[in-house]
Amino acid sequence: MDQTRVSAKEVMAICHAELARVGAKVSYGTPLFRIDIDNLAWVGLNRGVHNDFIRINPNIGVHCQPIQRLVCELSLERYQEGRFATVSFALGVATPAGTPEFIFRTLEDLRPEAERLASLLVDHGLPYLKQFVGYESLMSEIREFIPNLGGYPEKYAALMYLSGRPQAETRAFANAQKTKFIELGLADEAVFFERLLKKMALQNKQA
């Protein structure tokens, strides 16, 4: 057996260490960079374990804390910083040469590949993400994915609520999504929108 072969654990450890060196905080196994008071740059290190190498295909995204906190509240889940991205992309959309691959075959590959990952992320990934900071920017990005479900309708509803959209508009969207989810046989998920509507009604009573 080749003693210079690397394990997935070694690869993740060196990637986390290099990203920490350039300013990342690792939370629940996810590297995060602070963009501003409300937003974190999120890094997903998707790994493929093959017979003779390990491949890392990074995703980058924005974790908008007010949005994710509200989504967790209405889903009756505990908020975990950086657990999910609000929006995410392959790192390749931000790099001039397209989608980069990071291949780890031996111990000699560990640091150079991890350093290359950190460099591309800092030079291209983080600047790219800044265009998605702000409720309106996130709404524009998420809007087209609403029909795909996958948490996008919930995030869009939360964005409408927090961005101060007219309540009638937010209520109409929430009611439409609740009806759609029920029609799709997703009554448990539809409760999210019912909770949002109740939250809005309670606020109006207290105003």
Image (spheres, rainbow, N blue to C red):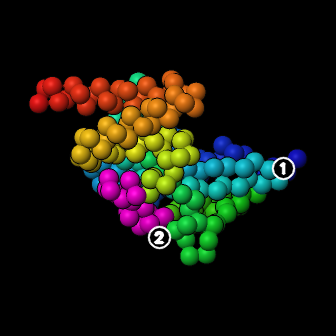
Q: Residues within 10 Å of mark 1 (few under 14, many from 20)?
A: few
Identity, as a three-letter code, of the amino acid under mark 1: Asn
In this rendered view, identify the residue nearer to me: 206 or 55: 206
Name which residue type carries label 2: Asp
Q: Is residue 135 left or right of residue 90?
A: left
Farthest residue in the right direction?
1
Locate the C terminus and report the quarter of the image it occupies.
top left
| Mark nearer the N terminus (1 vs 2) | 1
Residue at 67%, 61% in the rendered image: 102
Q: Residue 84 lies in magenta, yes or no?
A: no
Q: Is residue 149 above or below residue 18?
A: above
| Residue 16 - label | none
Residue 115 as seen in the image, left or right of residue 48:
left
Mark 2 secondary-structure assignment: helix
Q: Give the residue at mark 2.
A: 123
Q: Give the camera-side residue of 30 and 196.
A: 196
Depth order, front residue of 95/56: 95
Where does the image place residue 80, in percent across and percent down from the top left? Answer: 42, 34
- Total numbered labels placed on residues in the image: 2
Give residue 70's position: percent from left, percent from top: 34, 35
Residue 51, disc: 1
Distance of label 1 from label 2 (alpha carbons): 32 Å
Q: Which residues are magenta?
A: 122-140
